[in-house]
Image: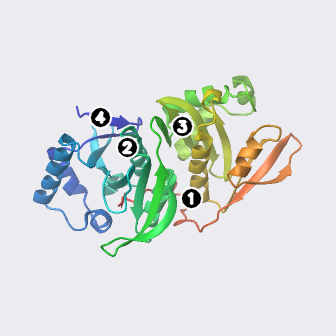
């Protein structure tokens, strides 16, 4: 059994080992060579890299490389590495790079792996994660946005290569990730714990919001996100993929004021703006929520008869490689 560093219940990150060489070589393709490796690998070069990764762990060096494992067999699906030193990095910043093998693309694993790597980096004291993607690598840009990164600027490195630089603030003990079926109970606990816009389990059921309906929505697309504080589920957001709306965003009362709502909304908005130019939500007019959404750039268009306000927000930049309906969660294989 490998030493799992982190797991979200779907993927796990563990240390790369020398016996991963065959799987890595088998998974290498033209896209990995183009975007990540810089040239085709050989057994000698891959084994040398894996030895170097192990030495970096032993020496507490600036490189921390992980294998992305999937399933009970812990199959190697790709790699993700963190570099705490390098060109363009300031103190407290860490560069995140990943690569997925062809058989594992299109399952949302890259976003999950990046989230887990960022959690590890935050626990090590990093305060800002950086991802760099070449401008034509549109799907890698989608992964960055899905994982809570924001495009900050276009850069040219000393090599002459041009990248779009994405950044994400990191806070130790605080994480946002894609939710899974195992999180549904926590989602309902959070929803029924809030003081404003409170609904009981019975009221939710009357509205057709049940654990089964949430499970069905999750099976259709990764439309639910969980915010955790020291491993405890503290908040969630959920999107209605087809309607183009933020269906819910709630924080446990004891965790309010920590920026979790803003982080969750960033995930939901990025997800929806891949599919819709305009997104919307409704919220209780008399609650604190309207002012929160206004601060996030939402516009109140009208008050509704049920005491709620209809808000909308426009996509301010063109969709990044706008996806078709049958491409619900496609991850680019790798990003620098």
Residue displayed at 54% across by 37% down? 227
Numbered circle sitting on residue 4: 4
Residue extending farthest right: 305
Is residue 155 shown to the viewer in this render? yes
- Check the image and report above or below for 283 versus 233: below
Residue displayed at 21% across by 50% down? 23
Towards the viewer: 206 or 265: 265
Residue corresponding to mark 2: 121
Image-quadrant location for residue 16: top left
Q: Earlier in the sequence, mark 3 or mark 4?
A: 4
Q: Earlier in the sequence, mark 3 or mark 2?
A: 2
Mark 3 or mark 1, whichever is nearer to me: 3
Numbered circle sitting on residue 335: none
Neighbours of disc 4 within 10 Å: few (<14), some (14-19), many (20+) = some
Query: In 3D space, how far apart are the residues under numbered discs 3 and 1 (Cα atoms)?
Result: 27 Å
Neighbours of disc 3 within 10 Å: few (<14), some (14-19), many (20+) = many
Numbered circle sitting on residue 325: 1
């Amino acid at each position: 059994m490998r030493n799992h560093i982190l797991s979200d219940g779907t993927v796990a990150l563990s240390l790369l080992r020398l016996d991963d060489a065959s799987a890595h070589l088998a998974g290498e393709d033209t896209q990995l060579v183009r975007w990540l490796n810089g040239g085709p690998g050989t057994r000698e070069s891959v084994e040398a890299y894996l030895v170097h990764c192990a030495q970096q762990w032993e020496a507490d060096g600036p490189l921390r490389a992980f294998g992305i494992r999937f399933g009970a067999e812990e199959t190697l699906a790709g790699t993700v590495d963190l570099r705490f030193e390098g060109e363009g990095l300031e103190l407290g910043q860490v560069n995140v790079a990943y690569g997925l093998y062809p058989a594992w693309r299109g399952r949302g694993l890259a976003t999950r792996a990046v989230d887990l790597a960022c959690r590890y980096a935050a626990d090590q004291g990093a305060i800002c994660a950086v991802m760099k993607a070449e401008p034509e690598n549109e799907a890698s840009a989608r992964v960055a946005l899905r994982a809570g990164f924001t495009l900050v600027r276009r850069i040219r490195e000393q090599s002459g290569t041009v990248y779009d630089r994405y950044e994400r603030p990191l806070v130790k003990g605080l994480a946002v990730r894609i939710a899974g079926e195992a999180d549904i109970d926590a989602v309902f606990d959070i929803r029924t714990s809030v003081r404003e816009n409170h609904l009981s389990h019975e009221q939710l059921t009357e509205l057709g919001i049940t654990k089964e309906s949430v499970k069905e929505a999750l099976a259709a697309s990764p439309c639910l996100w969980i915010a955790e504080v020291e491993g405890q589920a503290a908040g969630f957001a959920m999107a209605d993929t087809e309607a183009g709306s933020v269906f819910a965003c709630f924080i446990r009362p004891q965790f309010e004021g920590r920026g979790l709502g803003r982080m969750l909304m960033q995930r939901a908005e990025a997800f929806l703006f891949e599919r819709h130019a305009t997104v919307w939500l409704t919220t209780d007019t008399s609650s604190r929520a309207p002012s929160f959404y206004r601060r996030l750039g939402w516009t109140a268009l009208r008050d509704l008869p049920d005491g709620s306000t209809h808000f909308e927000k426009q996509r301010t930049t063109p969709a990044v490689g706008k996806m078709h309906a049958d491409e619900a969660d496609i991850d680019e294989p790798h990003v620098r």
